[in-house]
Amino acid sequence: MSDEPRHEVARLRRELRTAGHDWFDAHRDELPAALRAALAEPEAAVALFADVWPALPADVDETWSRALLDLGAELAAALPTSLLLATGFRRAAVHLRGRGAHRLAAVAGMRELAVHRLRDDDPDAAADALHDLAATYRAQGRLHKVVGCADEVLELYLLHDDRPGAARALAHLGELMIEVGRHDSAIKYLSRADKLFEDSADRARTLAALGRALWLSGDRAVAHRRFNRALALLIGTDDDEAQRVRDLVAGLESVAEPVQQGHADLDQQADDEADPRHAR
């Protein structure tokens, strides 16, 4: 390619760094054309793609955002393992989620994740991408998708033989299972996390969550033993966290047992998305 598209991209990036949102109003129409002209030299185009999302005003129309995201897909075909492109997709997801464009935010999140899956060299980065994608699914109310992301995080850390990462993933899954009313599953995940954690603070938080799951499942005697183990790790080392455990126990003791509706609701979400009559 000639140097002109590369120079145009460099000019736009320089002006963007100094002008911010005012830059977008001045360059809205020329930006997609400049990116497309630079596709033959995708490194320059990726840098502009990553820079532009934080500069977009909140009220930019969805059609324009979709067109920019589609240009990102073309860049991904040329540079499928670019970390800078992954950063661009993350910034896109954050912007789109912030303005309520959750479907597009999920597309951006999946494209970021695709980069990390292909690289397969940094489980923490891939897990972070999955957590951000899960934030979009949560904003959509798709809790079964949130759980699916958490499952993939666990599988990722297990495949990389990453014990601390697997412990964190198990604890997170346990908390999610409590949220959706699957208390027996929560107990299994949190018990596994307790065995993997080496840090006493991590173990204490996990034991407190495990106590909560046991309590909600009706096994209050064992729940109290887990709460006491958590307190034994915290008293004298983190009194604020110890008080939070005491407050958790007091809160559980003060309310009647909840109706366990979450499990059924989660299954219904998955069934609805599989049924074409519920497609949106």
Image (cartoon, rainbow, N blue to C red):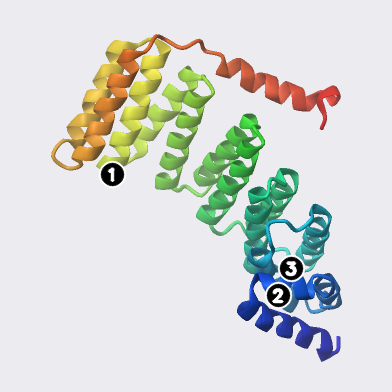
Residue 5, picture quadrant:
bottom right
Q: Residue at x 25, y 37 (%)?
A: 241
Q: Residue at x 58, y 48 (%)?
A: 132
> Residue 203 vs residue 60: left or right?
left
Residue 85 x/y as whole percent: 68, 65
The label nearer to you, 1 versus 2, is: 2
Q: CA gap, disc 1 to disc 3? A: 39 Å
Q: Amino acid at mark 1?
A: Asp
Residue 252, picture quadrant:
top left
Question: On screen, 204 above or below 123?
Answer: above
Mark 2 or mark 3: which comes first in sequence? 2
Q: CA gap, disc 1 to disc 2? A: 48 Å
| Helix, strand or loop under label 2 | helix
Mark 1 or mark 3: which comes first in sequence? 3
Q: Nearest the camera: 194 or 73?
A: 73
Mark 1 or mark 2: which comes first in sequence? 2
Q: Residue at x 54, y 49 (%)?
A: 127
Question: What residue sits right under mark 2 in the picture?
Answer: 23
Is the residue marked by circle 3 packed among few (<14), some (14-19), or many (20+) residues within 10 Å? some
Q: Residue at x 79, y 60 (%)?
A: 73
Q: The C terminus lies in which quarter of the figure? A: top right
Question: On screen, 107 above or below 247?
Answer: below
Question: What residue sits right under mark 1 in the picture?
Answer: 199
Question: What residue sits right under mark 3 in the picture?
Answer: 79
Residue 208 x/y as whole percent: 32, 28
Q: CA gap, disc 2 to disc 3? A: 27 Å
Residue 58, picture quadrant:
bottom right
| Helix, strand or loop under label 1 | loop
Q: Amino acid at mark 2?
A: Trp
